[in-house]
Every structure is written in structure tokens, then in C-alpha cells.
Amino acid sequence: MGTRTRRRLVGEHALLAALASDETVRRVLVRSGSDAQTSEAVTAARAAGVPVRLSSDGVMRRFAPSGERFDVLAVAGPRPAADLPGLMAGDGAVWLLAGLRYPGNVGFAIRTAEVAGAAGVVVAGELESGGRRRALRASMRADWFLPVLFQPWEDALDAARTADRRVVVVEDDGACAPWETDLTGRVLFVVGGEREGVPRGLRDAADVRLRIPMAGFIPAYNVQAALAMVAGERLRQAANQA
């Protein structure tokens, strides 16, 4: 599966320890109105050039483990790749959202990919700039913690092939269920749009096409539900290999 590169730092002591060890701290969240705004840890982070963002109680609760209350949270780990070649050349899973049109669906899918430890997400669709902003808000700002690139699917596929990534497409005409094939390693996972699904050229280029079983009358899962099932199976397989 590749090692998850992001690590959550909880509290001022954890942030200070990471800074002292020269670990790369990527972003710091500080509870608005708390004394932590002027604490030694936050002051040191600012001096080191780390972006510091003041956040509301609600945001801090969502990002904290088990809903506990902390005044300082941070993310540590290598800087995320800023371009397609760098993202595809790295470890872990990359998700390609091909043809999604609704910002809410895009945002929920990005959030799900981040929760599952993805290395990054590529969005290939017709979202205009305002739609992109709405999608990133709906992602619960997952783009703070992993790269989200807006690129044509053809470019993403070319970069994946150059980096020798397997391409796994999730589509109704797939030949096997997620638990019937190996989902670990360096994979580009592809899910398609709400109406047309995955573009034909992208489906034809797949190394594996997955089909998620359905038993109801409605003909398809929502895209983030399909993504979650495949991502969860990938995590299960990786845990069994550990």
C-alpha cells in the first residue's frame, strides 16, 4: 500500500518536538481566541515559515482525534507533490475522479480518499472555478493535507503509465469484485461521473476493471460510496499483509 506520509500532531508539545527534530511540519491549526496563538510552539512554527491558520471550535473538533478538545493541531510529513509526474512517481494510492460534475460529490470523494490515506487526488471534469472552491469546501479542506490537482484525465493516465502505476477502474461492467483482486501497491484508482461513468478511452486503458456488487433497484451507488468500498478493501488487504 505504501506508507502513509501524513502524521497528525496533537497539542503544543507534539508540535515543538516535531520542529525540534527537523520533521517537516506542513500546517498548523490553532483554536481562535485561545492562548495558544502566542505559545512557544506556534511562535516557533511561524518563525520556521509553517502556515498557521486560526480555526473555529467546530473545525478543531472535526480534526481532533475522538472529538477531544485541543488548542493546537498540526500535520507533519513530506511536502505533497505539486504536479502530476511527482504525484504518480510517489508511493500510495492516487484517485482519479473522471467526469464528476457536482461539487458536493467531488468534495465528498476527495474527503473519503484522504481519510483512506490516499497520496493524492486528480479531478478531471467540467467544474468551473467556483465549482472547484465549493468542492474543496465540501471536502472538509482535505486539500490542506493531500494534493488535489485539476487536470485532464488523459494527462493523468499518461503520467500514471510513465510512472508504471497500475490503473484500476471502478465501473458497472467490471470483471471482478474489489476483494477478488490485489488492490495494494502503487495504483491509480478511477471512478467516473454521475451520468456517463468513466470515459470509454479510460475504461479501455485499465489493467483491471472492478465491479461493486449491487442488490437494490436503484442502478448505482453514489460515487463516494463506491470509492469508500474500494478504499476500505485496499486498507483491509494492506493490514493483512503487514
Image (spheres, rainbow, N blue to C red):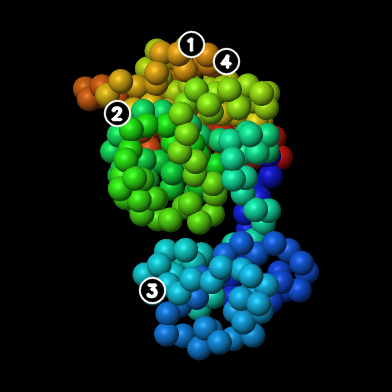
Number of residues whose C-alpha sits closer than 10 Å to that of mark 1, classed few (under 14), some (14–19) or many (20 or more): few
Mark 1 / mark 2, whichever is N-terminal = 2
Q: Residues within 10 Å of mark 2 (few under 14, many from 20)?
A: some
CB under 8 Å between callouts 1 and 4?
A: no
**How many numbered marks have been drawn onto this rendered protein structure?**
4
- Neighbourhood count class around disc 3 (C-alpha, 10 Å): few under 14, some 14–19, many 20 upward: few
Contact between labelled residues 2 and 1, with CB atoms less than 8 Å apart = no
- Work out which quarter of the rendered image holds the N terminus and state it: top right
Q: Mark 1 falls on what kind of element?
A: helix
Q: Which residue is mark 2?
A: 194
Under circle 2, the secondary element is loop
Residue type of the residue flagged with mark 3: Ser
Question: Where's residue 51, x and y in %?
Answer: 56, 68
Left or right of 60 in this view: 161:
right
Q: Position of residue 114 (x, y in %)?
A: 50, 47
Marks 3 and 2 in Cβ contact (< 8 Å): no
Lower position in the chain sequence, tag 3 or tag 4? 3
x 22%, y 25%: residue = 218
* Residue 204: mark: 1
Amino acid type of the residue tagged 2 in the rendering: Glu
Separation of marks 3 and 4 at Cα, in angstroms: 44 Å
Residue picked out by circle 3: 56
Query: What's the distance in space between the residues labelled 1 and 3, CA to CA?
Result: 46 Å
Instruction: Give percent across and percent down for residue 182.
Output: 61, 24
The amino acid on which the numbered mark 1 sits, given as a three-letter code, is Asp
Residue 70 visible? The answer is: no
Pick the residue in front: 33 or 68. Answer: 33
Where does label 4 land, which residue? 207
